Image (spheres, rainbow, N blue to C red):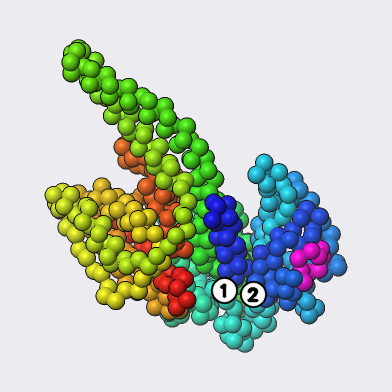
């Protein structure tokens, strides 16, 4: 499979798995793509929608609005979380939140529009019901898929729905009567109380923190990204603020995966070209230096000249290793796959590195699940991944540290096999964590920054996933999950 074909397949999978309707259109408004969520939301199949004008789902009284949106896209600008109304096939008017972005070609020219639509009809229904009577809205609030937090003007939580309990990990009774700020990271609470007071002075329906990365805090202290829309109602007990909270962890993960896949495909092509250009001159330089060093044995050179030649030789070899790493990074799988026993793979890899680890004072712990189902893969490539993770763990910990390697089966259908590498090292700073898979990103003085990029590409090429958990001073855990071989012999 070619790099751009692989990226296209991954992006298509991400689009189809989204819970939001994702629609592609030309700059003239002709629909070019229509995902499963769009079919479900609007009632038209992809075959019915693609090739028709976007006006298909726009009420006649809002057609001018769509013209303005497309004009904005033509100028290279987007619209984020714009609330409007769209039309389903059965004639039902749907309240939607729209994000519209320009689509650019390889030259950077705007060639189309991407539209993401979220149905907020239930959200509107909940707000309207609350305006009439707080005591009669329970069933409606519980039916909404978003978390709903209702607060009074003092910022005291007066009501939440079940989704809020699930999202934040608090039982309802632990939230009612508490300050709204308890749901935020501590460092953001004082600033938020000022924003809250300002909102109640001029309440209106709008997204919160548009263009900002919003964070919420669970009961266990973990933070997660959210999207929040604000509204308000006048009730029998006074003004109430409504926050509709959506956990966007999965969406951000999919977006990162899409961006990473695009970067890796582009850099792969570039890297292959650079590596080939480097190999010949570096090979010549290394060979000539080696000949000069051999000649120096029979015709001695000044000591400082000999030492300089050795320094040049070491660095030429380092450039050669970088070039080889670029080729490994760019190389696509041959497509040949065979059943791989991850337990056996771990043991084979530890044979290569365990003695070095023990000599460094590092303890190795194994927790390999018996009867682990095989995965379909390239054992050499997967061994490269495991070796890289073990080497990184070794570099991250001090003498007396520990590396744990484990495997486990993932329940469900079709199921999976999981490989975990955990260390007790220094951990990864939060500001570095989003970049660790970027090619050439490294914090090591002698590192090339290609190891994790190559590993990420190999895992993705095996239809696997990579998750990382790390905190400074508390070590790092890499979790690799692969599909197992199905009954038909495929993963």
- Determine the residue positioned at 78% across, 76% down: 89
Question: Which label number is shown at residue 123?
Answer: 2
Bounds of the magenta span?
Answer: 48-57
Return the residue nearer the eye: 389 or 253: 389
Magenta residues, dominant SS class: helix
Q: Is residue 101 visible to the viewer in this orientation of the structure?
A: yes
Q: Secondary structure at mark 1?
A: loop
**Residue 214: percent from left, percent from top:** 52, 58
- Image quadrant of residue 6? bottom right
Front-most of 367 and 431?
367
Front-most of residues 407 and 116: 407
What residue would you read off at disc 1?
A: 146
| Residue found at x 72% / y 70% | 46
The answer for how far apart the CA atoms under marks 2 and 1 are is: 8 Å
Sequence-first tag of 2 and 1: 2
Q: In the picture shown, does residue 364 fall above or below 152?
A: above
Is residue 323 inside the magenta stretch?
Answer: no
Residue 231 lies left or right of residue 74; in this view the side is left
SS for callout 2: helix
């Amino acid at each position: 499979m070619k790099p751009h074909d692989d990226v296209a397949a991954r992006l298509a999978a991400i689009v189809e798995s989204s819970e939001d309707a994702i629609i592609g259109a030309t700059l003239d408004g002709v629909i070019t793509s229509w995902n499963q969520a769009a079919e479900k939301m609007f009632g038209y199949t992809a075959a019915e929608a693609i090739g028709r004008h976007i006006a298909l789902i726009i009420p006649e009284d809002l057609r001018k609005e769509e013209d303005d949106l497309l004009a904005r896209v033509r100028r290279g600008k987007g619209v984020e979380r714009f609330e409007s109304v769209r039309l389903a096939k059965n004639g039902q008017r749907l309240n939607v939140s729209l994000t519209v972005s320009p689509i650019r070609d390889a030259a950077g020219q705007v060639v189309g529009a991407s539209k993401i639509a979220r149905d907020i009809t239930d959200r509107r229904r909940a707000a309207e019901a609350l305006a009439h009577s707080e005591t009669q809205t329970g069933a409606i609030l519980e039916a909404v898929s978003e978390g709903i937090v209702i607060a009074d003007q003092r910022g005291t939580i007066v009501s939440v729905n079940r989704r809020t309990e699930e999202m934040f990990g608090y039982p309802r009774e632990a939230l009612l009567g508490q300050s709204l700020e308890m749901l935020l990271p501590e460092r953001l609470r004082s600033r938020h109380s000022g924003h809250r007071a300002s909102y109640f002075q001029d309440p209106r329906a709008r997204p919160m923190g548009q263009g900002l990365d919003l964070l919420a805090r669970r009961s266990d202290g973990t933070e997660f990204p959210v999207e929040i829309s604000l509204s308000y109602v006048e009730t029998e007990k006074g003004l109430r603020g409504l926050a509709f909270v959506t956990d966007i962890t999965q969406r951000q993960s999919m977006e990162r995966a899409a961006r990473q896949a695009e970067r890796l495909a582009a850099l792969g092509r570039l890297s292959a070209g650079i590596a080939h250009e480097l190999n010949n001159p570096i090979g010549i330089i290394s060979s000539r230096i080696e000949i000069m060093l051999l000649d120096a044995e029979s015709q001695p050179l000044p000591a400082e000249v000999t030492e300089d030649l050795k320094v040049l030789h070491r660095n030429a070899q380092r450039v050669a290793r970088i070039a080889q790493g670029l080729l490994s990074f760019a190389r696509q799988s041959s497509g040949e796959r065979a059943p791989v026993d991850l337990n056996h793979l771990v043991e084979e890899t530890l044979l290569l590195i365990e003695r070095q680890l023990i000599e460094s004072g590092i303890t190795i712990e194994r927790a390999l699940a018996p009867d682990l189902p095989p995965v379909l893969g390239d054992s050499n490539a997967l061994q490269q991944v495991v070796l890289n993770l073990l080497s990184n763990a070794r570099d991250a910990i001090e003498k007396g540290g520990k590396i744990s390697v484990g495997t486990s089966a993932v329940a469900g259908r079709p199921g999976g096999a999981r490989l975990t590498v955990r260390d007790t090292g220094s951990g990864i700073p939060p500001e570095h964590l989003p970049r660790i898979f970027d090619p050439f990103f490294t914090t090591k003085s002698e590192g090339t920054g290609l190891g994790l990029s190559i590993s990420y590409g190999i895992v993705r090429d095996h239809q696997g996933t990579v998750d990382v958990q790390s905190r400074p001073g508390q070590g790092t855990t890499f979790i690799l999950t692969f599909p197992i071989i199905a009954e038909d012999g495929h993963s």
